[in-house]
Image: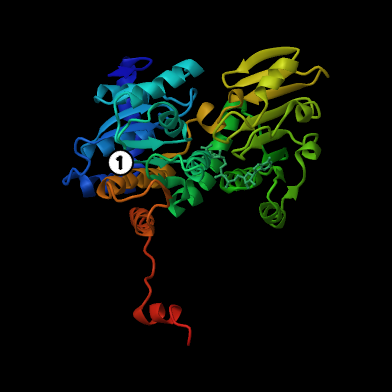
Amino acid sequence: MYKINDIKLAEQGRKQLEWAERHMPALVRMRAKYSKAKKLSGIRIAMCLHITKETGVLVRTLRAWGANVAIAAANPLSTQDDIAAALASEGINIFAWRGETLKEYAANIKRVLDTKPQIIIDDGGDLHAEIHKRYPNLKLIGGTEETTTGIFRVMALENKKLLMYPVIAVNNAYTKYLFDNRYGTGQSTLDGIIRATNIFIPGKTAVVAGYGWVGRGVVMRLHGLGARVIVTEVNPFRALEARMDGFEVMKMEDAAKFGDIFVTATGDRDIITTKHMLKMKDGTIVSNTGHFDVEIDVHGLKKIAKKVRRIREHMDEYTLPNGRKIFLLAEGRIVNLGAAEGHPSEVMDLSFCNQALSALYLNDKKGTLKKHVYKIPDSIDEDIARTKLDTMGVSIDRLTKAQKSYLESWEL
Ligand SMILES: NC(=O)c1ccc[n+]([C@@H]2O[C@H](COP(=O)([O-])OP(=O)(O)OC[C@H]3O[C@@H](n4cnc5c(N)ncnc54)[C@H](O)[C@@H]3O)[C@@H](O)[C@H]2O)c1
């Protein structure tokens, strides 16, 4: 069963999957390690992830372990149609195309839930939320959550004692946020901004909202390319870190007039409002790399704009009432997926080892876990890190017995 843009793109999609697999050696190795046991045999898995070549490699892995997969996109703009076609041609139930309307996006999420899944793999919490609103009778073994914003949502369910099944917080694994959120988003956000605009970064002033794992990755790469970077924060520890890492820290209302490029990375709403936009310089570029399109007030911008023109594929020019023009990338949606291809395969290798092994873990522990948000077990996290190092040809030391006992003793 599938509903996609064009099945004729399947051949191109398969080549992309081949390219991704070449760069995801840890996941390919995990696939081979657990293939024989077919531990997910007959298990129905519903996924809501960005439809990229890396997601395709994850889907193939779950399939190799015996699962029946149904998948929808985690964002109306992030689907790569050739990958959707390749997966459809391989018999995956897929309901996704680039440029879905919000109505189509919601309908596709319902379609995957109508396959009566037993395990949920989500990115951003839309599947979890839909189940809690409209699918109370699903018999679920458990679910996983890929990103910070989705973790906030499942934690909110748990805190209100509404969570219906155990959830593994994939985002909170060391082998996820330290690499994907930081280095993955750092590189791919710059990739999105550059593809959308083709601007030169050196010498520009960039304002990054949020100095969490995503924000600091984006800051690191902007700085590396020669931008002057200003950070805005609400958390005093993170503001202090940003300052001591060598960046200017100020309020958004003060930073608004300095920036040539803005990137929001907070997971929070109303970070750049029309009040800020009206202070911006003529020609300012505004983008978001947080999960949802709530960080920039696009609705308000549309209301006050005198004129809107599409200048390039992922860039719209808005003429403000004061005559200045600002340029919004990817409609204010997640810019690395809207205007580029998301994270490179090498880093998704780590994130999707976590997703795949979490699905195995949930199934192994069926019936024994509580309705609680769990961190992935340290042993799995560590296994992923060691496997990745091994695929990179990196060996590290191991603690000797004497070192271990020294580190565990208080007498010294
Ligand atoms: N683009 C991608 O591919 C990608 C990848 C991973 C995560 N994400 C998303 O990026 C967002 C950030 O994730 P993270 O892992 O960095 O989270 P995080 O919690 O580590 O960091 C978010 C930071 O934003 C700050 N913040 C919150 N409200 C703010 C405000 N009003 N002004 C300034 N700063 C504010 C917080 O204090 C925090 O330091 C989330 O929505 C997450 O889901 C996107």
Give 368 or 244, whichever is nearer the viewer: 368
Q: Is residue 81 visible?
A: no
Q: Is residue 60 visible?
A: yes
Q: Residue at x 42, y 25 (%)?
A: 80
Counting from the top left corner in percent of width and height, residue 374 is at 41, 50
> In the visual, does 251 lie left or right of 328?
right
Which residue sits furthest bottom?
411
The type of residue carrying mark 1 is Ile
Counting from the top left corner in percent of width and height, residue 247 is at 72, 50
> In the visual, does 145 lie left or right of 318?
left
Q: Quadrant of ligand 1?
A: top right
Q: Residue at x 58, y 22 (%)?
A: 314
Counting from the top left corner in percent of width and height, residue 141 is at 30, 41
Picture quadrant where residue 15 is located = top left
Q: Residue at x 37, y 34 (%)?
A: 55
Q: Secondary structure at mark 1?
A: loop
Q: Residues within 10 Å of mark 1 (few under 14, many from 20)?
A: many
* Residue 124 position (above or below residue 32): above
> In the visual, does 330 lie left or right of 13?
right
Residue identifier under label 1: 141
